[in-house]
Image (spheres, rainbow, N blue to C red):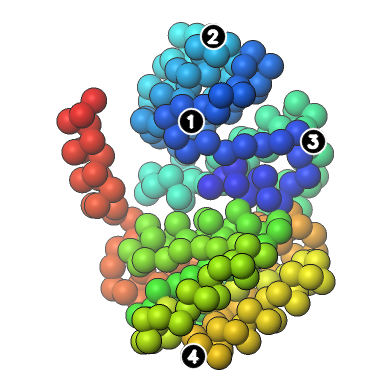
Amino acid sequence: MGAHLVRSAFDISLPLQIVNDYKLPSFVNQNSLVFVSSYSGTTEETIAALGDALKKGARIVGIASGGVLIEILKKENKPFYQLDPKYNPCGQPRMGLGYLVGALLGFLSRLGFISFSDQNMEKVFAALSKSASLFGIDCEVNQNPAKKTAQNLLGKIPVIVAAEFLAGNAHIFANQINESAKTFAAYFLLPEINHHLLEGTRFPGNLGERIKFVFLESALFSEKIKARIKITKEVLSRSAIESVSYNINGGDKVGAAFEALSFSSWTSFYLAVANEIDPTPIPNVDYFKQQLAKFA
């Protein structure tokens, strides 16, 4: 998720492909740079992909808090950044996303693939601090977009829609709702959804009673995307499907992406509270991993 945010919001001088699989693409070779990133350092697919990268002779950089991933990187004498997640007491990777994003930004900046200085990071911190006061617990519902959005989504299946530099945020938002609020959610990106999804809103007939679209919007979007959002909402309304929007106030693409990250984090938390469930435990995922370990 962190890599998706970085790829969407930052101008990177080389292509960045995200691989969520056991094997790397066939084009990876000794001239490729592979980032292996796992919050825990125990993610099965990431460890397998690291083995594939080593076989291919790729250049490798690792990011993790520990685990087998760091052990292998040390053994192979590969560079890595080992996180110290002291500000994430719950230990859940989704709540430590800032570590993974920050580490990746640090490497890409030092390597010259993006332009992002310590001063830029200070601006991000300031924006996040401002967002915390807007979305935080002490802000009343009628003035708090995150609380209001959570109320609107209660009992619904959220469908997150975004575009351009907020594409990674749509991905993160859906995952946070899945994990924190224990609620089914999906995300789609403009302009692609206009070619197929709109026709998929006609059946079943009671679909509008079950789902609600959430648009992440920004004044920084291209005029074409703004037009698509407006018309998409009109089409949804014709199918009796409701939608809500959050308009990102960030003054630039990077600031907007981090504001959206703060908004989605708080919204998913409030939706968990509304569902009267502890957002931290992930019993289904834990059970899955226990069963998968039997096939190791």
Crowd class of label 4 (few under 14; some 14 to 19; many from 20; radius 10 Å): some
Closest to the observer, 148 or 234: 234
Helix, strand or loop status at disc 1: strand
Residue found at x 71% / y 36%: 15
Query: How far apart, in angstroms, are the residues tagged by discs 2 and 1?
Result: 15 Å
Say which element carries label 4.
Answer: loop
Q: Which residue is mark 2?
A: 77
Q: Is residue 44 left or right of residue 260?
A: left
- Looking at the image, which residue is at 50% across and 66% down? 266
In space, the residues marked 2 and 4 are separated at their CA atoms by 58 Å
How packed mark 1 is, by other alpha carbons closer than 10 Å (few <14, some 14-19, many 20 or more), is many
The answer to whether 32 is drawn above or below residue 15 in the figure is: above
1 or 3: mark nearer the eye: 3
Q: Which corner quadrant holds the C terminus? A: top left
Q: CA distance from mark 1 to mark 4?
A: 45 Å
Q: List x then y, in percent, for residue 59.
A: 62, 16
Residue 13, disc = 3
x and y, in percent, of residue 260 in the image:
62, 63
Residue 64 tag number: 1
What amino acid is labelled 4 in the image?
A: Ala
